[in-house]
Amino acid sequence: MSDTYHHGNLRQALIEAGIKIINDIGEDALSLRKVAAACGVSHAAPYAHFKDKTELIDAIKASVTEQFMKELEAAVSAAPDPEKAIINMGKSYVSFFLKNPDYYKFLFGRQNIVAHLKIDESRDDDYPPFILLKKTYLKYLKESGIKMNKKKQETGLLKIWASAHGLAAIACMSGVVPSFDWEKMLKGDELLK
Amino acid sequence: MSDTYHHGNLRQALIEAGIKIINDIGEDALSLRKVAAACGVSHAAPYAHFKDKTELIDAIKASVTEQFMKELEAAVSAAPDPEKAIINMGKSYVSFFLKNPDYYKFLFGRQNIVAHLKIDESRDDDYPPFILLKKTYLKYLKESGIKMNKKKQETGLLKIWASAHGLAAIACMSGVVPSFDWEKMLKGDELLK
DNA sequence: CCCCCATCTTGACAGTGTAAAGTTATTATA
DNA sequence: TATAATAACTTTACACTGTCAAGATGGGGG
């Protein structure tokens, strides 16, 4: 149980070294050998604690998720009532990853999407499905005669996109086909009318 | 312009071979050398068309995104009015990735999340933030005295989660901090009251 | 005290991305 | 048409990676 890992807590040290490398250089640069070297240990030493590279990575992910959970739980606890709890949790959920986008990319992916959320700003390199959504949404507002200020328009657009993208994420990542009522999503939402 | 790539269309052939490998074996198994071999070409040949491995991957992603866009545009075109267009597009957005989850993982990440969307089913290996959300949501329903059937409860839960997760995805991937009104999300939504 | 076994080291191997230099074929030019 | 230029491709080489097998080491239980 000493602080030096030599016959101590190499496993935990490897996890922490891995997190540090991801934050400093990025996930792509994370290699078993670098993690081992960062712990002052030979390149095959990790195999005493993890059968795979993926097993190390999974352990790192579990560690980051634990940290994520602590913040979410704090947000829920700080709320006076359940409604505020959900709101707080939603905020925390997003702000955690905003504080460290490296973690989001590490946990869920790497891709960098370009998209201008402002209604009247668009560029050619915006993510094409988003451009299409924006155009369709603006046409919807126009033809249905719905009047709202730009801010609200942008919130509505973001909500649709976030729901669609989040839904796709959940569906693919969980392997479950969620039943989702898009009609209700539009018609039952004050933001969109 | 012949159909054999020897001094022809190697670039396109590499992209297609890459897509095939991703579908057949998975993204992790995709290597420049395998792609080159699949085109019957030496392992350094791709460097005449792509400066990097990432440049090849980006080209593959662009190709998949193009295919994605075609389906979305078809969904929009098939709709009789803009409202239906948005609904259709939302459905298509999700169903495209459901049809080939490999593409979602390839474009946006790899992580497999476990989560049981059913209100009364839960397991220990469910994604912890989701477990917390479900508990908080159920408490919210109980304390606010809101009555709805299970189906509607599940839809509401899914909507909150998809919005939060999708929002985090968009925020981190676009690098833009979107302003989002969580209060309005809850209170302005028919699904949640 | 000694042996066991988890822990760690050493050495090896195939596979990877990428750079440099050489070869070939196509196209442009004169 | 002959030749020069250039894009496409090959060969060779190198550092780095994950993983395995075999050996060293050293601390705890018999």
Image (spheres, coloured by chain):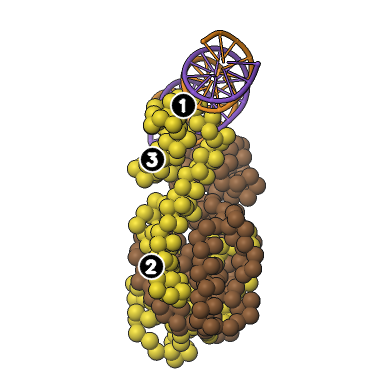
Chain colours: A brown, B yellow, C purple, D orange
Q: Which residue is mark 2?
A: B78
Percent position (x, y) of residue B174? 60, 59
Observer able to see residue B110: no
Percent position (x, y) of residue B169? 54, 61
Earlier sequence position, callout 2 versus callout 1: 1
- Three-letter residue code for mark 2: Ala
Q: Quadrant of residue B23?
A: top left
- In 3D space, how far apart are the residues under numbered discs 3 and 1 (Cα atoms)? 23 Å
Q: Which residue is mark 1?
A: B7
Q: How many marks?
A: 3
Q: Which residue is mark 3?
A: B21
Quick one: B119 or A165, which is closer to the camera?
Answer: A165
Instruction: Tell me, yes or no, whether the two marked residues, 2 and 1, touch with CB atoms within 8 Å.
Output: no
Against A24, residue A123 (above or below) is below
Q: Quadrant of residue B85?
A: bottom left
Earlier sequence position, callout 3 versus callout 1: 1
Secondary structure beneath disc 3? helix
For the residues carrying marks 3 and 1, which lies nearer the camera in this image?
1
Q: Chain of mark 2?
A: B
